[in-house]
Image: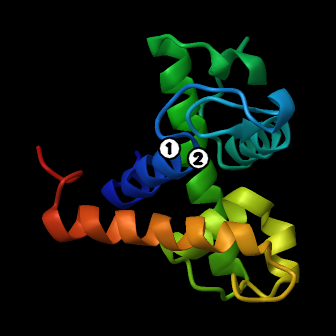
Amino acid sequence: MITPETSDIVNAIAIVESDCRNVAGDGGRAISIYQIHEAFWLDVYSFKVKHKIPLDIGVNWRDIGFDNATSRALATNTCAIGVEMIEEYLDTHSANATPENIYAAYTVGRKAFHVCGFNINDPGFPVFKRAKCRRVGELVRHANQFNLAHTD
């Protein structure tokens, strides 16, 4: 079950990554509104297996890039489970699972963010991604402040 907090982060990722447009980025290596790379898809698949989360049988990475309801749902589910995977990784390494840090690990990879000491201000962290990390944090705080994503 995806929590409201995870949903807020997923929504912020879509805004920051693609302005919620279903586009291919990074020369076709990133797809969907979340700009998901195949390596991330495979990491999420492994996380699902490890945690006994039902798999999308017969679905591959490219299937999340189509502009239809099924593909959007698959992409959203992949991103949400990926956010939970990142949260678990950060918790395991005693790093703060803030929206900024979750997005940082999402955008550069968990291990690359680990090498930066889980710090977006580390000289090894890409400078151009710092503003996006901060934007994700602002969007999540804004959603929480107004309780926008948590209404029934």
Other residues around mark 2 within 10 Å, as few (<14) / some (14–19) / many (≥20): some
Marks 2 and 1 close (CB-CB < 8 Å): yes
**Marks 2/1: CA–CA distance:** 5 Å
- Residue at the spot x=31%, y=55% of the render? 4
Picture coordinates of residue 5 (x, y %)? 36, 61
Which residue is at the front of the view, 39 or 53? 39
Mark drawn on residue 128: none
Which secondary structure lies at badge 1? helix
Which residue is at the front of the view, 89 or 79? 79
In which quadrant will I find the C terminus?
Answer: top left
Q: In the rendered image of this protein, does residue 94 appear above or below residue 66?
A: below
The part of the image, by quadrant, that contains residue 48 is: top right
The residue identified by callout 2 is 17
**Callout 2 amino acid:** Glu
Whether residue 3 appears in this view of the structure is: yes
The residue identified by callout 1 is 14
Picture coordinates of residue 129 (x, y %)? 69, 67
